[in-house]
Amino acid sequence: MTQSLAKKFTLADLRTARQSGQKVPMLTCYDFSMARLMQEAGVPALLVGDSAANVILGHSTTLPISLDFLIELTAAVRRGAPNCLVMADMPFGSYQASTAQGTANVMRMVQLSGCDCVKIEVAAAHARLVARLADGGVAVMAHLGLRPQSIGLLGGYQARGRTADEAQKIVRLAQRMQRAGAAAILLEAVPPQVSAAVVEAVELPVIGCGAGPACHAQVIVTHDAIGWTAGGRVPKFVPQLGDMATPLRECFAQYVRLVSQGVYPAAEHCYEMPEKEKAALTRSRQAAKD
């Protein structure tokens, strides 16, 4: 039996979870209807990820998605799940040019979407942007480890932190983001030893995306977990929660059969015209023929 969220889940609750050891589930979400279902299922936190570029728009990378489009998706999720902690991804090109550009675009995202937090794929140079946003009252989740928006530099989606040197760089970057004022850390595709080291090195909630059990919360791309990833490889860290593609495909095929065979629409699907109006229409059509 599912239990809908009775009250708003906030960053304060996420920080409390770090202290208590309670693990927080998060899912990606991109529309009003799914957000409503997730809130009803008791999912406390939703990420409107730039992964929408892949699973919604069909791109091979996250790079083409626009800020305006992500604002619209985030606002829809916010309306569908008012009690969830809603985190918005800042897309490629929306914050890399300068601190001023990033600040303006993040403020725009927060104002227009109503999100609770923004996620930024950070390098060391983004500490200034994180500090500026924190000073302005914006909660920033600093995304470390595998950074999909850097695929052009990385050359592919490989796990990060597999060497001691690279692991230490991730830990130091997490500490730098904490000093800059980040509200949380997200680690993607790193070994569990790396996430454990980050959890030990910072006081912030750490969200894992393929980062092992030490993290205080876990987030996955929903489409990967329910069989909706079309023609793509599902990451090894994603649990298979079910096959939603097969029943949907069967529903669509049933509709094709109903229409093709002339079964739909039937009488029960049609609107009725009062008998007096039907008679008047018949007379009008007959007069037109004459």
Image (cartoon, rainbow, N blue to C red):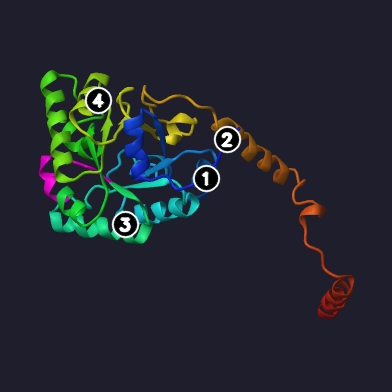
Of callouts 4 and 1, which one flags the residue occurring earlier in the amino acid sequence?
Answer: 1
Of callouts 4 and 2, which one flags the residue occurring earlier in the amino acid sequence?
Answer: 2
- Left or right of 264 in this view: 146: left
Residue located beneath label 4 in the image? 195
**Residue 6 numbered tag:** 1
Of callouts 1 and 3, which one flags the residue occurring earlier in the amino acid sequence?
Answer: 1
Q: Quadrant of residue 220?
A: top left
Is residue 64 visible in this depiction of the protein? no
Query: In whole angstroms, how far apart are the C-alphas of marks 3 and 4?
Result: 29 Å
Q: Check disc 1 and give the amino acid type.
A: Ala
For the magenta stretch, what is the residue range? 119-129
Q: Check disc 3 and give the amino acid type.
A: Val
- Depth check, front residue: 267 or 187: 187
Q: Mark 3 vs mark 2: give the one in front.
A: 2
- Residue 122 painted magenta: yes
**Residue 110 numbered tag:** 3
